[in-house]
Amino acid sequence: MNSVNQSLLPITAKIDEAGILHIGGCSTVDLAEKFGTPLYVYDEESIRNCCRQYKQAFAKYPKTNILFAAKAFMTSAICRIMHQEGLGLDLVSGGEIYTAVKTGFPMERTFLNGNNKSAEELEFALKAGVGRIDVDNFSEMELLDKVAKSINMKADVLLRITPGIECHTHDYIKTGHEDTKFGFDLSQLDEAVRLIKEKYLNINLVGLHAHIGSQIFETTGYIDLVGVLVDKLAEIREKFGITLTEMNMGGGLGIKYLESDDPPSIDELAEAVLGALDENLKKYNYPEPILYLEPGRSIVGTSGVTLYKAGSVKVVPEVRKYVSVDGGMADNPRPALYGAQYSAVIANKANQERTEKVTISGRFCESGDIVIRDITLPEIEFGDIICVFDTGAYNYTMSFNYNRVGRPAAVLVKDGKAEIIIRRETWEDLTACDVIPESLALPKAESKCAGCCACMG
Ligand code: LLP
């Protein structure tokens, strides 16, 4: 079955007779008009469809738990959707735990990851009832034991290992190869298990965890990963007489950003993982463990698009035509960080012939602020709405306030209705954390009021 991650557009995307792109039954031109631009638009049906497809694909292994990797798109409304769809959450910080707790998320379905969690975050996680904590290294193990002891609790943990698997993706988003900051090297695993068994009595070891990287296009890495994880479970049973009952395979399934991208479907991923699991468990006659997966991008990536308004045009004679939009690298840092490429349409000219090669540039003060280099589109005019596809994962969560530009709003669309799930940041929000110390106070006479609402005394 085709899954949403194999499509460029959200599943509800349609073009009407006037050539206007609709998502979730809403005209994107109307959305831009009503909520302003830039605007993140999330298609609820696509998100829920992905959640259901993951559950269905892994249904034949009932011990599967799908945890949404919140780092891909974390906000209160998404926690609520995951709650309703019966998924868990992979969390990585106190802020993410706090968000989940605030929405009333069932915290036993959450998992805390990260390579440098603070004592404060670990204590909060334990008190909030986070289901499992991943232990990434020896210092963290010592810290977690100390924190758990101080509040008289025992932490259920999985040890994160570096499985030594290279996958073909951008260097910055590979994590499973040996030279990485994440997880225990395989040569350190025995020592880690021994320490928990003999010394760290407030830690209860239940399983192993690994994550090979992100935006992965081959299932072979996952097949290899299952092999490594089951090998290590069997080895621990043999050496220590402990039968661990859980394994977490991380996330990473890729999505289609360009017509030429061809990621595996969720079903193909499940088939590869479950086939390899069955084979490896049989090899050691190992009892079926609880299996966790942590997909992020493949659940929300295709579901989200960004709407921008076209502004200034600059033609460099015989070189390039730049069309600047009202957002850019601060709402989508991925092109500048990873050389990420995107597809787009002019939302109000979606049925017109593409005749002109342009470069869509952002509004921020950096030459590298390019949204899409060299894309062929219908002729762009000032005020056209440009819709960039597949911006649902790691765009809002990695957005920032460079040039003191507020972050965009996000709306959730469904059946012709659009609802705000993140309100647009105002100039007031941008100054909310600023403090002028007493030592910088202006002498009374110089303290002039400009008569505007921004007066800071
Ligand atoms: N589990 C762990 C332990 C992870 O580190 C990650 C992602 C995931 C799950 C979810 O991976 P996904 O299914 O979303 O690929 N900012 C980068 C991606 C960084 C991924 C970090 N870890 C980007 O925009 O491409």
Image: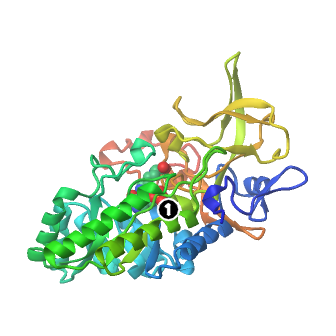
Image coordinates of residue 325 in percent, x first then y, are 66, 39
Q: Nearer the viewer, residue 402 or 43?
A: 43
Identify the residue at horizontal 24%, vertical 79% (top origin). Answer: 243
Q: Is residue 88 above or below residue 37?
A: below
Residue hosting label 1: 296
In the rendered structure, the answer to whether residue 447 lies left or right of residue 93 reads right
Disc 1 residue lies near ligand 1 with CB under 8 A: yes
Residue extending furthest toward the front: 283
Q: Is residue 264 above or below residue 354?
A: below
Identify the residue at horizontal 56%, vertical 57% (top origin). Answer: 264
Image coordinates of residue 132 in percent, x first then y, are 32, 75
In the rendered structure, the answer to whether residue 357 lies left or right of residue 57 reads right
Give the position of the N terminus as an image quadrant: bottom right
Determine whether the residue tagged by mark 1 lies in a helix, strand or loop: loop
Q: Label 1: how many residues lie within 10 Å, few (<14), some (14-19) or many (20+)?
A: many
- What is the quadrant of residue 16 in the picture? bottom right
